[in-house]
């Protein structure tokens, strides 16, 4: 409606070609021009809704555009579901006091109240919203069942690693990760005797699945180079919940989507943040803080760090995931929409 996809295309292209250092400049430009474009946003929103049948309720899953929608539809409830862990200048979600906001973290809920959203309009969901398919995964096993799964993992020491950086993974980083993981059985670490590396579990072989998403260059590069029989390459897929169910650990970026889906699926995360601070986006810093504080994964700056992970370590992170409250966020949002719809119908019946 308001060209939000254009910004996503720029973001994904920069990530794909490992040009994340440019992103702070892009975000700085957007933050500078956004206030000046408020009138344009409002005009486009009005034109969009005027060209359609009357709208009774809006559910928004995007930042930037919520103020325009609130002003374009002054009598229509606007429910904004935050898909970032927090509101930020780079991704502004809290834009209008009339919004009904669904916050998946304690921090974003505090931000909503501080912004001035009334408490009855600032809804604290039990977690971040993900697709309903993810709620059928092993996170719903009993603690005893998951403990047995973890014990089997430690005993076998065969880790199933899912490399998942979203729809447009960085080509160079993923290629380096795959090469390092395939060479793991002969891993050597400067300053550590071989027997210590072996004892830490860093040489145990791994089963690797790489999700290339829409990065055709990465898919072709992996297809044309020799890989081990326990390495699988897939392109874009709509069965990500099944891939997550089959793995032991996710290696990827600290994006809110990747991390939220992994946690609902009961999978720890190893988050690659790069050696330059600019590699991590503003909206990803709170994701990293959440992961560190909950002990459900770790951040690594280099590929060498990413491959130094043992079954015992992954099992420890998994135990901490089990301790998190159940996430029913998508169903809680659906219940909120149903309540709002019933309220609107009641009001219409009263008028008639």
Image (cartoon, rainbow, N blue to C red):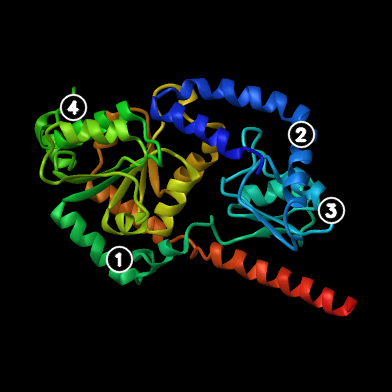
Residue 19's image quarter?
top left
Marks 1 and 2, how far apart in space? 52 Å
**Front position among marks 4 and 1:** 1
Name the residue carrying label 4: 189
- The answer for how far apart the CA atoms under marks 1 and 3 are is 49 Å
- Tell me the quadrant of the picture where the N terminus can be found: top right
Residue 128 showing in the rendered view? yes
Q: Distance between the residues labelled 3 and 4?
A: 62 Å
- Say if 220 sits above or below 71 in the image: above
Whole-percent x, y for residue 299 in the image = 39, 36
Q: Earlier in the sequence, mark 4 or mark 2?
A: 2
Helix, strand or loop for disc 2:
helix
Q: On the image, numbered disc 1 is attached to which residue? A: 146
Q: Position of residue 59 (x, y in %)?
A: 66, 57
Q: Which one is nearer the viewer's eye here, 281 or 287? A: 281
Decide which of tag 2 and tag 3 comes sooner along the chain. 2
Q: Quadrant of residue 301?
A: top left
Q: Mark 2 points at which residue?
A: 40
- Residue at the spot of label 3: 74
Earlier in the chain: of badge 1 and badge 2, it is 2
> Residue at 31% across / 35% down in the picture?
216
Q: Is mark 1 on a helix, strand or loop?
A: helix
**Callout 3–callout 4 Cβ contact below 8 Å:** no
Between marks 1 and 3 in the image, the one whose residue lies nearer the viewer: 3
| Left or right: where 20 falls relative to 210 | right
Give the alpha-carbon distance from disc 4 to disc 2, as whole Å: 56 Å
Q: Position of residue 335 (x, y in %)?
A: 63, 70
């Amino acid at each position: 409606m308001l060209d939000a996809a254009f910004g996503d295309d720029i973001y994904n292209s920069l990530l794909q070609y490992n040009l994340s250092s440019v992103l702070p400049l892009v975000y700085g430009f957007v933050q500078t021009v956004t206030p000046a474009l408020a009138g344009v946003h409002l005009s486009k929103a009005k034109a969009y809704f005027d060209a359609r049948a009357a709208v009774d309720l809006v559910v928004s899953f995007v930042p930037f555009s919520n103020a325009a929608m609130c002003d374009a539809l002054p009598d229509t409830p606007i429910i904004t579901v935050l898909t970032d862990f927090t509101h930020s200048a780079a991704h502004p979600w809290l834009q209008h006091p009339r919004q009904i906001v669904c916050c998946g973290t304690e921090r974003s809920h505090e931000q909503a109240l501080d912004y001035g959203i009334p408490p009855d309009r600032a809804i604290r969901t039990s977690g971040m919203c993900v697709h309903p398919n993810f709620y059928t995964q092993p996170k719903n096993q009993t603690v005893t069942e998951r403990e047995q799964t973890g014990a089997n993992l430690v005993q076998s020491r065969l880790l199933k690693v899912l490399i998942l950086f979203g729809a447009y993974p960085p080509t160079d980083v993923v290629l380096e990760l795959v090469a390092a993981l395939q060479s793991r059985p002969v891993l050597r670490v400067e300053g550590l005797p071989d027997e210590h590396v072996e004892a830490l579990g860093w040489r145990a072989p791994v089963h690797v699945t790489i999700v290339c998403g829409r990065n055709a260059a990465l898919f072709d590069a992996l297809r044309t180079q020799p890989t081990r029989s326990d390495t699988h390459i897939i392109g874009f897929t709509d069965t990500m919940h099944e891939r997550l169910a089959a793995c032991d650990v996710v290696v990827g970026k600290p994006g809110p989507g990747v991390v939220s889906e992994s946690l609902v699926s009961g999978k720890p995360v190893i988050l690659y943040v790069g050696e330059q601070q600019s590699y991590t986006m503003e909206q990803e810093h709170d994701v990293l803080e959440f992961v560190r504080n909950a002990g459900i994964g770790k951040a690594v700056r280099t590929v060498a760090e990413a491959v130094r992970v043992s079954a015992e370590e992954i099992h420890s992170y998994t135990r901490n995931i089990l301790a998190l409250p159940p996430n029913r966020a998508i169903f809680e949002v659906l219940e909120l929409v149903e309540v709002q719809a019933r309220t609107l119908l009641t009001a219409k019946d009263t008028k008639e």
